[in-house]
Image (cartoon, rainbow, N blue to C red):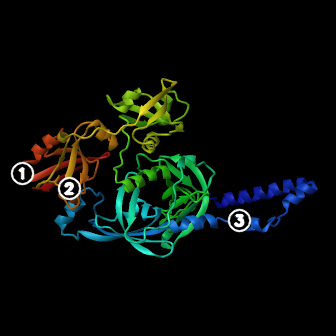
Amino acid sequence: MIISRTSRRRYAWGTALAVLLLLPALGHLGPAAAQAQRKEPPPSRAAAQYSYAPIVKRAAPAVVNVYARGRVAAQPPGLSGDLFRDFFRDRMGMSRDRVQSALGSGVIVSPDGVIVTNTHVVKVGATAEIRVVLADRREFDARIVLQDEKTDIAILRIDGGDGKFPSLQFEDSDIAEVGDLVLAIGNPFGVGQTVTSGIISALGRSEIGRADIQSYIQTDAAINPGNSGGALVDMAGRLIGINTAIYSGSGGSHGVGFAIPSNLVRLYVDSALTGKKIQRPWLGARLDSITREIAEGLRLNRSSGALVTRVHKDGPAAVAGLEPGDVITTVDSHEVTDARAVNYRLATRGIGQVVQVEVIRKGRPVSLRLPLEPSPPIGQDDVRNFTGEHPLDGARIANLLPHVADELDLDETSGTVVLSVRPGSVSDRLNLRTGDIIVSVNEQQAESVVELEKILARRPSLWRLVIKRGRQVVQLQIPG
């Protein structure tokens, strides 16, 4: 809390006045109460030596420093956007690459050297070189096995070693409670491994960051730059979260840090260990968070929950009986505050399960059973890998089917969308991204990938491309 000079003066006078008012009362304290006011030494040697050291000795060896280095495209001066920087860089004769380095932390979660960290720690270009340093100062190269920008989770594997690395066991993050003691272990500011202590300040923080299936653990244990990817451990020395972000205006710790819950992290670790692709359950419905205005309109007593705005025919939500206008309040007895909290609960339950969903429908509670199913596969006629002398070379583009729109968190349900971009391709140099909607090419709208193919088959002297990314619409003209 920041107190102005005037406020400090008033605060001091108020404190002094409070002491004066209490003096008569203190004079009438009995012997027992007076004894309680005195400072006493610890009652025993064991009490004086109370320490987190045993927990740290178990957990710290499994926390590593992560150093990443790679080449990334240089940004031309004066361009505020990043959608088409490569195009301008090519035309302006600027240097194409620059070296970027990143420093963070990681946690070994398997004796054979599987490490969990944050995607933003290791995302330093397509040719990232990663080095990890253990607590005992041993150094190893590591490679990326899996990474997901939406959840900011990355899985690494150590190259070399004896396969007997120290590792942390996962704890069920759903058993965590506000007030539980926790330790944060990482490498803040690159000073070396550091341990800080605190409590869990809040649970289910889903309004932080851009992840669409997130439900952060909030802690007041000091977390600073460099702690990203480090461990949040409980008093049993088990991993309950991966530290990932702080709320700060200065870049330093203000006692508001956030960790990815271990139950979500474990999904990605299991995928890395088994080689199975992560499949998120498909809800088959569009959800919006409840605002104060929506709550008032629906006569809800609080602005919490997820509003069902659209239900896709024959999807899992339709099978369960969800209807537009329903407000989802809990999933398997866990309260959900918004749409991202719902997605988190479904993702951590996994495909093949059935969850109990409580909703408010026209002011009345309704209980539903929702089957968790994977999204339907994209048919051959609904997706294309584009190659050739055009701006979409290297882009994998699909029709905007309902489940594709849901997976990419898009409101649009028609047209075409970028699913992925091949590194080094024309579309990559134009910085196209997953989720970019192709609005038009040469002023022609393509409602399907088949139509888009026909448009790209022509060879104009000038390409005019319109892309929609979120709420931003960008137009570009490229010589043919």
Q: Position of residue 145 (x, y in %)?
A: 35, 60
Pointer 3 residue:
50
In this rendered view, identify the residue nearer to me: 83 or 367. 367
Q: Nearer the viewer, mark 1 or mark 3?
A: 3
* Mark 3, secondary structure of its residue: loop
Residue pictured at 75% horizontal, 66% vertical: 46
| Res. 427 mark | 2
- Spatial CA distance of label 2 from label 3 is 59 Å
Quadrant for the C terminus, please.
bottom left
Pointer 1 residue:
459
Residue pictured at 26% horizontal, 55% vertical: 83
Q: Nearer the viewer, mark 2 or mark 3?
A: 3
Three-letter residue code for mark 2:
Ser
User: Quadrant location of residue 439?
Assistant: top left
Which callout, 2 or 3, points at the residue further toward the start of the chain?
Answer: 3
Q: Is residue 246 visible?
A: no
**Left or right relative to 29: residue 13:** left
Location of residue 180 with respect to 284 vertically, above or below = below
**Left or right relative to 173: residue 428:** left
* Mark 2, secondary structure of its residue: helix
* Mark 1, secondary structure of its residue: loop
Label 1 with label 3: CB-CB less than 8 Å:
no
Three-letter residue code for mark 3:
Tyr
In this rendered view, identify the residue nearer to me: 241 or 408. 241
